[in-house]
Image (cartoon, rainbow, N blue to C red):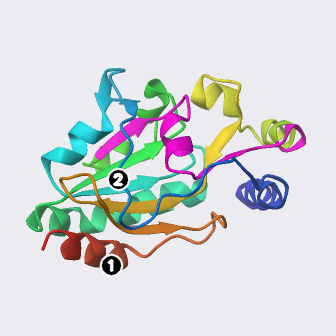
Amino acid sequence: MMTRILSILLLGTALAQAQTNTTTLKVGDAIPDVKLRTEDDMEVSLKKLVSEKPTVLIFYRGGWCPFCNRHLQSLAGIEEDLNKAGAQLLAISMDQPSKLKATPDREKLHYRLLSDSDAAAAKAFGIAFKVDDATVEKYKGYGINLDAASGRDHHILPHPAVFVADTSGKIRFAHVNPDYKVRLEPKEILKAAQAAGR
């Protein structure tokens, strides 16, 4: 079953690359002032969170994506080192707050998961794309319902991305790859965070 799901996810990559009309943020740009929601459905300001300490922002597609879940688990391995470097890790997806709590192995992830179900952050960072209708239906055939995951019918997902920002909100590191099968190694993320804290 997992092989079949992975196959349809791979098909989705080829069919769903229509990037929105936004420029992807880069090193030197400022973090946008967008609102996100916590697992308890409380609104939080991304800019305020970032002002508290150097921040690693991970954008992932959702708890339904096996590639994302593997990446989230691998990031747990660097969380202690990030904390020692004075940095925090925030992971942002299209999942609505109630779905964040259902993320596989959530209890093993001690960092914060945040909801961008209206896609405001993904759009502001320039990493949003719309999944075409045919792929949405194919996903449903494999038990993946994007509407149920986000609580919206926009069918927008983020390209997996990593941004590191200092407390002023300036982006010090940026990595975006439209191929969601390719994720930045945790050790590279840790290096970027340590460099941003200097």
Q: CA distance from mark 2 to mark 1?
A: 24 Å
Q: Residue at x 67, y 67 (%)?
A: 179
- Asked if residue 147 is positioned above or below residue 141 in the image, the reply reads above
Q: Secondary structure at mark 2?
A: loop
Q: Amino acid at mark 1?
A: Lys
Q: Can residue 146 be spotted in the picture? A: yes
Q: Which mark is residue 187?
A: 1
Q: Which percent across, then down, holds residue 194?
A: 19, 74
Q: Residue at x 56, y 35 (%)?
A: 119
107 sits left or right of 116 in the view: left
Determine crowd level at label 2: few under 14, some 14-19, many 20+ residues with C-alpha closer than 10 A. some
Residue numbers of the magenta segment: 112-135
Q: Can residue 63 be spotted in the picture? A: no
Q: Amino acid at mark 2?
A: Ala
Q: Residue at x 43, y 27 (%)?
A: 97
Name the residue nearer the viewer: 134 or 129. 129
Name the residue nearer the viewer: 176 or 11. 176
Q: Which residue does the numbered mark 2 point to in the structure image?
A: 30
Q: Secondary structure at mark 1?
A: helix
Q: Which percent across, then down, holds residue 36?
A: 39, 31
Q: Quadrant of residue 9?
A: bottom right
Q: Is residue 118 magenta?
A: yes
Q: Which percent across, then down, holds residue 49?
A: 23, 41
Q: Quadrant of residue 38?
A: top left
Q: Which percent across, then down, holds residue 184?
A: 47, 73
